[in-house]
Image: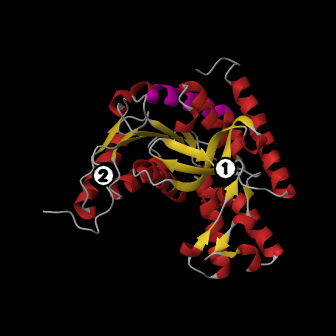
Amino acid sequence: MSSSPFSPPSCPQARVSIIGAGKVGSTLAQRVAEKNLADVVMLDVLEGMPQGLALDLMEARGVEGHDRQIVGTNDYDDTANSDIVVITAGRPRKPGMNRDDLIEINAAIVKTAAKEAIARSPEAILIVVTNPLDVMTYVAWETTQLPCRRVIGMAGVLDAARFKTFISMELGVSIQDIKAMVLGDHGQLMVPLPRYTTVDGIPLMELLDTQTIERIVARTRNGGTEIVELMKTGSAYFAPASSVSLMIEAILLDQSRIVPAAAYLQGEYGLRDLFIGVPCQLGRQGIAQVLELELDEAERAAFQASAESVAQHLKQAHEILSGSTLG
């Protein structure tokens, strides 16, 4: 029987491994499988936990109607030959913490996860979700020595999604009509760009006054903190998982989508040797290109401040890891 024209896109041989089977990782596994994008391996250090989650997700197939295989494991060997490796492992934020407070805790975790996973899947594309994201993406790249265009940080998709959500709520319009762009680090110095944000092609600045836009920008910067303070015992996971899922889909289906993501800069925007959020073209080989937007003086100054913060935190991460070479 021929497949239905309404069937979801499928990559028959694709395999995605998720390192860290917490709420982000397990929700991502669900998204990837139910979109029929790839078979999924979830790895976690807690014995039995990823296996139980995988079995639960496998049993859901009887309702969801896909045939993807979902495996839970504590052994990196089970992740071998993955097309994409996603690192979500690390400690989440608690109330009163910012993302940068996690550097000392999470740098060693990401270093080990990246090294072990890429040793088994040397041709994989690596997506990093662990906070502080821009710094952890650099740690993962430096550890693995992968080509820089095959190492990507997730956050820009999430930050733009939050920006779009708050605009949609303010205007009472469909989020499908909103296109938004966010540059910079995944933190208080991120740079939402109202000038590059539109509603059905109409510039945002023609629809909202400056004070309202500034309020939405501030809420976007604090989007994750707002959720942490409300939940008290956890942090966001639905929207982060959806954001990674979009990136995986763009890569596996070679969609050449333009999305904001943390990429390694080699002179773009006058910056070098750091990962930071910029518009990227995503396809089967990872980042096909970084797009360089024309920024006005205020936007460029804000982006430079964000980059300087990332560089300082990267220096801190290196010091924490005893100044040793991460490769």
Please tell me how crowded label 1 is: few (under 14), some (14-19), or many (20+) other residues with Cα within 10 Å. many
- The secondary structure type at the circle numbered 2 is helix
The residue carrying mark 1 is 278
The residue carrying mark 2 is 56
**Residue 315 x, y percent position in the rendering:** 75, 29
Quarter where residue 147 is shown: top right
Tell me if 123 is positioned left or right of 313 in this view: left
- Amino acid beneath label 1: Val
Quarter that holds the C terminus? top right
**Residue 179 x, y percent position in the rendering:** 61, 68
**Residue 280 x, y percent position in the rendering:** 59, 50
Asked if residue 91 shows in the view, the reply is: yes
Quarter that holds the N terminus? bottom left
- The magenta-colored residue range is 104-118
**Which residue appears at 63% of the width and 75% of the height?**
201
**Residue 69 x, y percent position in the rendering:** 27, 46
- Amino acid beneath label 2: Asp
